[in-house]
Amino acid sequence: MTSSLGTPPGTTVVDVAVIGAGVVGSAIARLLSGHELDVALLDARDDVGDGTSKANTAILHTGFDASPGTLESRLVAEGYHLLRDYADRTGIPYEPTGALLVAWDEEQLDALPELQRKAERNGYHETEIVGPGEVYAQVPALGPGALGGLTVPGESIICTWTTTLALATDAVHRGTRLLRGHRVESVTVGGGDTVLHTSVGDVRARWVVNAAGLGGDVIDARFGHDRFHLHPRRGELFVYDKQARPLVDRIVLPVPSKLGKGVLISPTIYGNVMLGPTAEDMTDRRDTATTESGYAFLLDKGRRIMPSLLREEVTATYAGLRAASDVGDYTIEVDAAQRYAVAGGIRSTGLTSSMAVAEYLVDLLGKAGLSLHERDDLPEPPRMPNIGEARPRPYADAERIARDPAYGTVVCFCERVTRGEIRDALNSTIPPHDLDGLRRRTRAMNGRCQGFYCGATVTGMLGDAPPHGEGQQR
């Protein structure tokens, strides 16, 4: 693979190397590149957002239920506003659906006032405790037995795939050197720079930022630290067909437990309905298999929450891994002596907090000695393709089709993806390397037939696309 450093690996020293091109690492690289710095963004995988970030439950959180006084609660609250504003400017699909926490027993009902007080301590004052009548007025399809609820009108659904891609694209437009397929295998800290020994070759950097997601503690240990430990927490989900969408127009949440927010039912930005996730602690950091026991668990929960949903067709099932930390908060620190920073233990709330994490960490880097001079020649943020259902899509845009008939040629009929959209993705700033990457950029092959109809055409278009060397991604 060609290096976007523009010279053989190891001969150029960048100012900052960011390890991990998930949503947090991409946000950090984007912000750093807004300064007079030479930034490299590395990822072990062949695409941005291909690790923990891609399997998020895709909720833009208000932070109402975070632990008050933690760094996480602060950054989620700040990140909520930052990301919502950025989504408006870039076209990242999101919908302010609101959420409803449902209490199914007396213990959960008794917990609602404390949840409301917690929200207020977190600076969110828009919740309301409601009785069963209002619960069923808001979500008539709920199963019987709900005793009450807590409304959270500010919660939204968002496209996690487009969020990471937008931040990484913005970073590249600002000059970040994107190095996909560069797994950091060891590090050597020197007097003037650190050498990251990767699977492709050496990358030298004056400063290093560790945003490696589930591998964050491994990288941290290579810099001599032992301050947090991660393990994968697998979450399995069902995705129901678009015909199920009338059943639920907002996020239906359980009363949270220590393991997380529990099993929810939520509309998706793509017009589906999602049930999940499970929360299974694992040891294998690569095990994203779905399981019979996971299915049984979700079906049991779904039968209680919304039995009519289980009569709808399942379009897909998948599993993602979340980075569960033995520290109860984010670990965001700078080691000035080694010119090294870490953003670790950033769990599923990292989608919402990503831009605030970047601001917080870059401020720490400046205080630790990184020279930060803001640029006055920044390009406009990218305008991202709309793959959500909240706004018109290309197949329904007569003016756009008149200008370019490729947007009127539907290739994937389940998701109504056009030839023009696939062509644009293949020729974008950060093109996909494989079919999964193309799915995340266009929704092609993600529908109810799972590529049975369009798979050959989409695969052919990917195969016919010109090769994109990483060196072109400046």
Image (cartoon, rainbow, N blue to C red):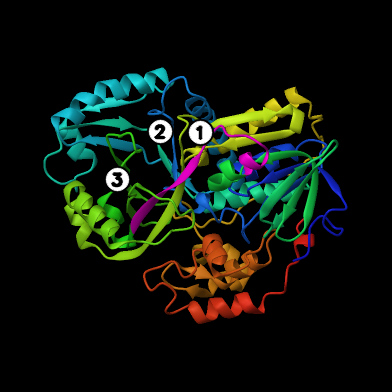
Which type of secondary structure does the marked residue at label 1 adopt?
helix
Estimate the spatial distance between the alpha carbons at disc 1 and disc 3, rounded to whole Å. 22 Å
Q: Position of residue 363 (x, y in %)?
A: 69, 26
The residue that disc 1 covers is 80
| Quarter placement of the C terminus | bottom right
Question: Residue under circle 3?
Answer: 263
Q: Residues within 10 Å of mark 1 (few under 14, many from 20)?
A: many
Residue at 59 percent of width and 80 percent of height: 460
Instruction: Determine if residue 382 is in view.
Output: no
Mark 2 lies on residue: 154
Q: Nearer the viewer, residue 245 or 182?
A: 182
- Contact between marks 1 and 3 (CB within 8 A): the answer is no
Question: For mark 2, does the 10 Å Cα neighbourhood hold few (<14), some (14 to 19), or many (20 or more) residues?
Answer: some
Is 205 displayed left or right of 125 in the figure?
A: right
Q: How far apart are the two marked residues, 3 and 2, measured between alpha carbons?
A: 20 Å
Question: Which one is in front in this view, the residue at disc 3 or the one at disc 2?
Answer: 3
Q: Residue at x 69, y 57 (%)?
A: 182
The answer to whether marks 3 and 2 mark residues whose Cβ atoms lie closer than 8 Å is no
Q: Is residue 193 above or below residue 117?
A: below
Mark 1 or 3: in front is 3
Q: Quadrant of the N terminus?
A: bottom right
Residue found at x 76% / y 28%: 337
Which tag is nearer the camera, tag 1 or tag 2? Answer: 1
Q: Is residue 206 visible?
A: yes
Q: Amino acid at mark 1?
A: Tyr
Question: What residue is drawn where x is 65% and y is 41%?
Answer: 210
- Is residue 224 on the magenta stretch? yes
SS for callout 3: loop
Magenta segment, which residues? 219-238
Instruction: Name which of mark 1 and mark 3 comes first in the sequence.
Output: 1
N-terminal of the pair, mark 1 or mark 2, is 1
